[in-house]
Structures are given as C-alpha cells and as structure tokens.
Amino acid sequence: MEKHELVIVGGSAGGLQTAICAQKHHGLKDILVIRMEEKVMVPCGIPYIYGTLGAVEKNIMPDKLLGEAKLKIGEAVSIDRKNKTVKLKNGEEIGYNKLVIATGSTPLQPPIPGMDKKNVWFAWKNTDYLQELAKAIEGVGDIVVIGGGFIGLEFADECRKKGHKITVVELLEHCLQLVCSTDLCIRAEDSLKTSGVNIITGNGVKSINGKEKAGSVTLQSGEEIKCDMVIVGIGVVPNVKLAKDAGLEIGPTRGIKVDEFQRTNDPDIFAVGDCAEKYSFFNGEPVPIRLASVATREGKIAAANLFEPQWRNIGTIGVFSTVIGDTAMAMAGLTDTQAQKLGYDVIVGEAEAASRHPGTMPDARPMRVRLAFDRRSGKILGGCVCCTMTVGEVSNIIATAIVNEMTMEQIAMCPIGTHPFLTASPLAYQFTDAASNALHKVKNMVKAA
Ligand SMILES: Cc1cc2nc3c(=O)[nH]c(=O)nc-3n(C[C@H](O)[C@H](O)[C@H](O)COP(=O)(O)OP(=O)(O)OC[C@H]3O[C@@H](n4cnc5c(N)ncnc54)[C@H](O)[C@@H]3O)c2cc1C
C-alpha cells in the first residue's frame, strides 16, 4: 500500500497552500495531494470566464505550484482513522502519517420549485461544468441572477458586458448587505443600474417556471420575469461527508470542527478552507465566512502545526473586495450592524481625497475610506474603501490594523509613504485621516458632555 508522510484531500486554495507551506516550513517532500478534478479552477476567477477572461482555459491554477508534492486524481470516499488510511472510489487505499482535509464547498441549492430545470446554473468549481455554462450562455438573451452577493453581482456584471439582459433578484433590502456598509451596497447597485442591469431587492424567487427549461421566474411579490437562463449564487455548503463519516466533529455552521491549530478531534487530522469551521476574531463564535484568502491562511497554519503546535489561528475576519462596473470596493472586519449586534459602541471616521496628488494627475479619482471603531476602547472594528483600483490593498491594511487591535490614535499616527502617481497627498491620506476624523468626533463628544 502506498503511504505518505502527509496526505491532503483537496487541491484548491486550502489544499494547495497546505502543500506549498508544508514543503517550505518542514522541508517535507513526501506529500500526496488527492483531488477530484484534472484541472483546478481559480475559484475567484469563475465569473470572469464569461466576460473579461473569455475562456475557461484562462482560469486554471497551474499544477507547478505543487512543487515536489505528488498529485493523484480521484475521489476520497472514506477515512479509516484506526489504520490511518484514505480509501479512493476506485478501491485504492493510501496510508498517511498526517492528513489534511481541504474538501471545500459546493453551491447551495435552495428548495425553490423548478431549481432542477436544465438552464438553471450554479457556480460549481468544475472545469467541465463551467465549459458547458460558457457554451450555454452564448445562445441566451435574458438572464436572471438569483442572489445579490458578490458572486451574483460579479456574474451579473460580466454577463452584461457581453450584451445579455440581466435581472438580479436579492432577498435582502440591498445587494452585498451581508458584507458591506449600506452606502457601498447602494454604490454597487447604482453602478449596475447605470449599465442597464435590473436590480430587484427585498424580494425572493418563489418559483422557476417552464417545462424542461426555465422560461420565467415568479417573485414572492407575484411579479413574473421572463428569462432564458437562471444563474444561482446564494452561498455554499461545506463538503464534510468524508469527515463526518469518519467520526470527526461538525460545528454549528456545518464546517468540520477545528481547534486554534486547525486540528480536528483526531490529532493527526487537520481541516482547512471552506470545509472547516471558522471562529470570529472578535468573540470566538462560529462564523460562516468562506473565502479563498481564509482558506490559504488556514492552509499555512495547518502546515506549520503538523508535527507540533506552532502557529495559532487568532480568529477569522472577512476581507472582501470586488469591482462592479467601474466601481471598485473593499471591506474588512465588521459592518456597523454586525458591530452593534456584538455590543460595540460604534463611532465612524471618514476621509475622502484624490487617489493621486495633485488631483490633476492623470487618472486621479476620489478615494474614500470609512473606518468603524469601538468608542470605549478606541480599537478598530472594520472599514470599507472605494472606488479606485487600489482598494483591495487598502482593505488588507485595514485588516492588519484590526487583527493587531490598533486604536484610532495609533492609526492616525501611522507612518505613511506617498507618491504623486501612487497615493493621495500626505496632507490628505485617507486611511490615517479617517482615524483622525473619528478621534476628533470622540474628543468633541467628550468636550460637549
Ligand atoms: C464564483 C466565486 C467567486 C469567488 N470569489 C472569491 C474572491 O474574490 N475572493 C475570495 O477570497 N474568495 C472567493 N470565493 C470563495 C473561494 O472560492 C473559496 O473560499 C475557496 O475556493 C475555498 O477553497 P478550498 O480549497 O477550501 O475549497 P474548494 O475551492 O471548494 O476546493 C475543494 C477541493 O477539494 C476537492 N475534493 C472535494 N471532495 C473531495 C474528495 N472526496 N476527494 C478528493 N478531492 C475532493 C475538490 O476536487 C477541490 O480540489 C469565490 C467563490 C466562488 C464560487
């Protein structure tokens, strides 16, 4: 029987990062990665296949990232924890010393009547399926996108670029509401509306109608919308069957329970990525944040802890970024609503300035940073930024400040570097100025009291 020092089930963001880091961290050479698909999609690139990239082949993760790790294509169907083996669908058994489960997630399929019709599509991370979707999209006119989260909006925006007539249906009051502050949600909606996308919020899809194929959807309000195709992007379900059948514990958000070292209740088995439970950085409670950036971070942590606990997972915060139309936006940590629910007394600081200086530099655009702090401790809880192409990096800075529990004073005093082509002026640097703005508000409140 084939046996390896480290076996990883799953070859996408979480599994791949574990393999990369186990080699770097421990110099481990005897690693086997088992995954179901011949070619792995870059998961975050999937919506862009249908517009910007133009082809499934342009969205593939290169296998050279595996380094010296070996690769086996197959489906793991069971784990024998006593004998430390993984069984594949073809009957093959593979022994492990340490096992990392990185089986990811699959699209959530809500129980809406008509969901099983031929032209109803999901964001499956599967090359063949996405190839079929690419062919199917070519021939259609009207598309209904169910779900106004970032996956739904990215699909909507890419498809409208190709000339399709798009309607997005979102159950909540605003698109992106679960991850963004309301002003950013409205900006994203406005950007799509301006480019001709029909946005319906505060309304769900009651049924998908048609014989074999969907020809329309009926909303909870009773309105009927004609369509040639439906794309569903309303969340994911962690793939935990393999772990559950092996007796590993499952948590409240349906992920595999792990400790702060990414260990399951079996000390030789770790879990990372979408299949693993996440715990909030703010209060340690389970949170359903499932992102590639979280999966890779957990892969690094698991790899470091394979043979002895070294790196602790200090908890998960969401860091999201996207571009809708020509509006780029990003968000890290808690929204105001989430922070208030956790009992924080939220105070907001804001700053807007040209992204380059002087503001007459070519392509200078207004960039706005909004930071939320806890008034009592002064610590940063979250922040959002729009609308320049650097927002992704700024939200990463905000995330760094959050996990280091920086206060408004510390951020206001942060050292910064600036350049006319690259940043705002040092007189109006948005990140530090937003913290100063919050600080002044607090000082004025104290004076007024
Ligand atoms: C359309 C879309 C856009 C997204 N955009 C972003 C974004 O912009 N930023 C971001 O951070 N996140 C984004 N995400 C989320 C991100 O894709 C996931 O968080 C990420 O893919 C999780 O990685 P993972 O390795 O945990 O799991 P997955 O990517 O789900 O991979 C699971 C792997 O496990 C393998 N596997 C599963 N079961 C078995 C088995 N039994 N045997 C063998 N192999 C198995 C699969 O073959 C696959 O290789 C997006 C997701 C989607 C769908």
Image: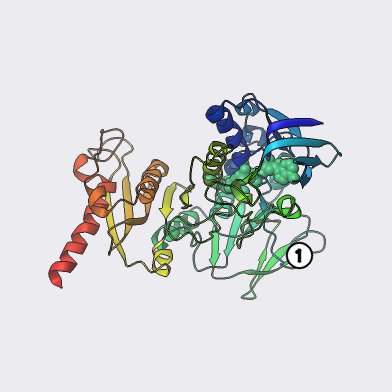
Percent from the top left, x then y, of residue 92? Answer: 84, 36
Percent from the top left, x then y, of residue 8? Answer: 67, 38
Residue closest to the eye, 159 or 104: 104
What count of labels does the image hold?
1
Q: Is residue 424 visible?
A: yes
In the image, ligand 1 is in what quadrant?
top right
Quarter assignment of residue 128: top right
Percent from the top left, x then y, of residue 413? Answer: 21, 46
Is residue 57 shown left or right of residue 87? left
Vertical position of residue 67 compared to residue 396: above or below: above
Callout 1, which amino acid?
Gly
- The single residue placed furthest to the left in the displayed view is 447
Q: How is colour applied across the structure in the image?
A: rainbow
Residue closest to the eye, 243 or 435: 243
For the N terminus, which image quadrant? top right
How busy is the neighbourhood of tag 1: few (under 14 within 10 Å), some, or many (20 plus)? Answer: some
Is residue 399 shown left or right of residue 376? right
Helix, strand or loop at mark 1: loop
x 53%, y 59%: residue = 287
Residue closest to the eye, 348 or 132: 348
Is residue 175 shown left or right of residue 354? right
Is residue 99 shown left or right of residue 160? right
Vertical position of residue 132 compared to residue 258: above or below: above
Q: Can residue 163 be seen in this view?
A: no
x 40%, y 48%: residue = 399
Residue that carries the numbered disc 1 in the rendered image? 114
Percent from the top left, x then y, of residue 368? Answer: 32, 51
- Mark 1, ligand 1, within 8 Å: the answer is no
For the C terminus, which image quadrant? bottom left
